[in-house]
Image: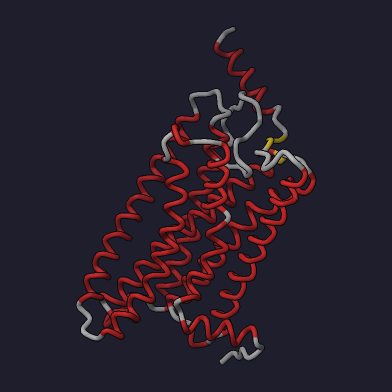
Amino acid sequence: MTESSAKSQQMSNSSSISHFLLLALADTRQLQLLHFCLFLGISLAALLGNGLIISAVACGHHLHTPMFFFLLNLALTDLGCICTTVPKAMHNSLWNTRNISYAGCAAHVFLLVFFFGAEFSLLTIMCYDRYVSICKPLHYRTLLGSRACAHMAAAAWASGFLYSLLHTATTFSLPLCHGNALGQFFCEIPHILKLSCSKSYLRELGLLGVSICLDFSCFVFIVFSYVQIFRAVLRIPSEQGGHKAFSTCLPHLAVLSLFLSTAVFAYLKPPSISSPSLDLALSVLYSVVPPALNPLIYSLRNQELKAEVWRLMTGQCQKH
């Protein structure tokens, strides 16, 4: 077969794919319904928790600060993540199917990369907010005024959009000729790349490499910032002041650790310990669990947020 005919055959195979087959979460009907109920509970918890945070920040005038403004944006990304991955998994479990359309898969990839990219950018910005608040308190209003915060939030969303557009366009321009079965319960770029039979997938790998370098730069910035933060906190003479500084940093650090550790371990774990059940558990941990846990982590140690959520739930919320 000539090179041109082989290429046309590849393109034909790719264009003939009208849908993908997602990973089945369970083989028996009882387990499928159990997974449906589990995902329903997690998604309701995420919707309730993040919805309360968004409402509390919007409602409470005293929460109109940079920290809570970025937390509101983070809650929006968490809502986006949970609404992208979970509904299709619930539908497939309930109706005992694995299908997702080609366009639906592309939308999955675009939205997931968009929200994850925006979330990591926002977590980096929130680290900068904590750094300025603790290490440069006299310059806080200058460096983090309302206009600066709006620009940073817009940059986070815009970077997530551009990041997502590039990855989605590159991934779905590849010819696919290794079937249409994905080893994941939602559409994810690495699993789609496994179906490619063309060397052009190296473009997407190169783009992933550049993205990893940028993400690593953000991670280095976060580590450096927290080293400076902890050094500054240890120099605070007042025990109460040090405790308050730690209480504002620990939730962000916990959310960041949960977000990064599960994703990094899922992709960088040794092949020797890989198994379908472990891979599935890890994918749930980094894609489904954080959006449900983040509101709990942030509200547990923040008295202002807890008080405003309580006022909201008891109907005492008033705009000022």
Rendered position, 282 above or below 9: below
Q: Residue furthest right?
A: 95
Q: Residue furthest top?
A: 1
Q: Position of residue 166 (x, y in %)?
A: 51, 44
Quarter of the image with the N terminus is top right
Q: In percent of the image, x 38 and y 42: which residue is there?
A: 210
Left or right: 293 as drawn, with respect to 207 = right
Left or right: 63 as drawn, with respect to 110 = left
In which image quadrant can residue 147 be found? bottom left
Q: Nearer the viewer, residue 131 or 171?
A: 131
Q: Position of residue 126 (x, y in %)?
A: 40, 68
Q: In percent of the image, x 55 and y 85: which residue is there?
A: 308
Colour style of the rendered protein structure: secondary structure
Rendered position, 57 above or below 34: below
Q: How many marks?
A: 0
In which image quadrant can residue 175 be found? top right
Q: Nearer the viewer, residue 170 or 93?
A: 93
Q: Position of residue 235 (x, y in %)?
A: 20, 77
Q: Position of residue 106 (x, y in %)?
A: 63, 43
Q: Nearer the viewer, residue 115 or 314?
A: 314
Quarter of the image with the C terminus is bottom right
